[in-house]
Image (spheres, rainbow, N blue to C red):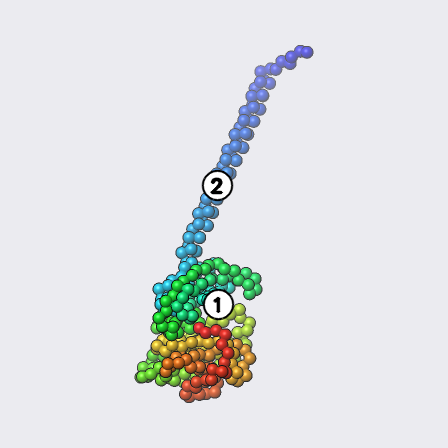
Amino acid sequence: MKQKKYSSGDSQFRAWIQAIVIITVLFGVFTASSRTATKLEATKTATARTESATDIQDSYENIDKTNIQDGIITINYMILDNLRYKVMIKKDNSSQFYDLTLTGNKNYPLQMGSGDYMVWVLRQKVDDKFSVVYKETVKATIKDSKKVYLQSIGEVNWNENMEVIQKAKELTIDCKTDEAKVDAIYKYVAKSIKYDSAKEKLVPTMSFYITDIEETFETGKGICYDYSSIFASMLRSVGVPTKMVKGYSKIGKVSNLHAWNEVYVNGQWKVVDPTYGASFGLSVVRYENPSNFTKTQEL
């Protein structure tokens, strides 16, 4: 067989083809390397962002125990979504649940005396089911169990700068006893706050309800939760241990969840219901029979 001879033109053509192939291969390698480098850089950036966000989140996941001797802890938890959050505080076989909000008061009471408390932050998953997103055990040594009922917490939220708190001090400036303070503030709340029937109808449609004593004071209207909260806040601010209590009452045949108060006077806890005081137009504090009330929660 005769061997085929190539002209100089054929040789140049083959050289061009080989050059094109080499350039194509090198370009592919360069492109792949660039893509890999870009992906690695993006991964590093994403990781850094995640770590940064985690660091920020972690810095806001803690329990401040500064006032634990007074029966109060402050829960710092950064809420990054629109889900509902709760706090569960457990000691021995008793548990209390509270709402955790983005902007609300983050103080929570330790109402079960000295000892070890388990504290959980819970995030809503589906309907009324929640998952644990943070937990911690705290040890409390509480010398006076009544002190917790002098503090500002989520639903009894007050501070010295509020106008309503200044009003409480004005009303009690000449009072010589705690019982006199209770009477003065009871009469003021019963006379100044009107029952808000329109709000009462709206509350069942809300996922949860947080009272605002400044709003109650300014509008002069509220429902039982508002009466109980403003009454407790005003009395706590002038040194009278006061509970906000939720549950059910036999008085007036109220079937819905109700709120009232207990005040510590003359060495004992006494039941007071400022909502009924307003409804009945009472001009003097009336202490109720505890047997007419069934508690579900104390705050």
Q: Which residue is mark 1?
A: 93
Residue 8 quadrant: top right
Foreground tag (2 vs 1): 1
Q: Secondary structure at mark 1?
A: loop
The residue shown at (54%, 78%) is: 256
User: Can the viewer see residue 200?
Assistant: no
Q: Is residue 129 visible?
A: yes
Residue 222: x %, y % from top left:
47, 78
The amino acid pointed to by label 1 is Asn
Pointer 2 residue: 40
- Name the side, left or right, on which 91 lies relative to 160: right
Which of the pair 181/241 is nearer the observer? 241
Foreground: 158 or 239?
Answer: 239
Where residue 185 appears, as percent x and y from the top left, is 39, 82
Q: Along the horizontal axis of the image, is 186 left or right of 175? A: right
Residue 50 higher or lower than 280, as above or below: above
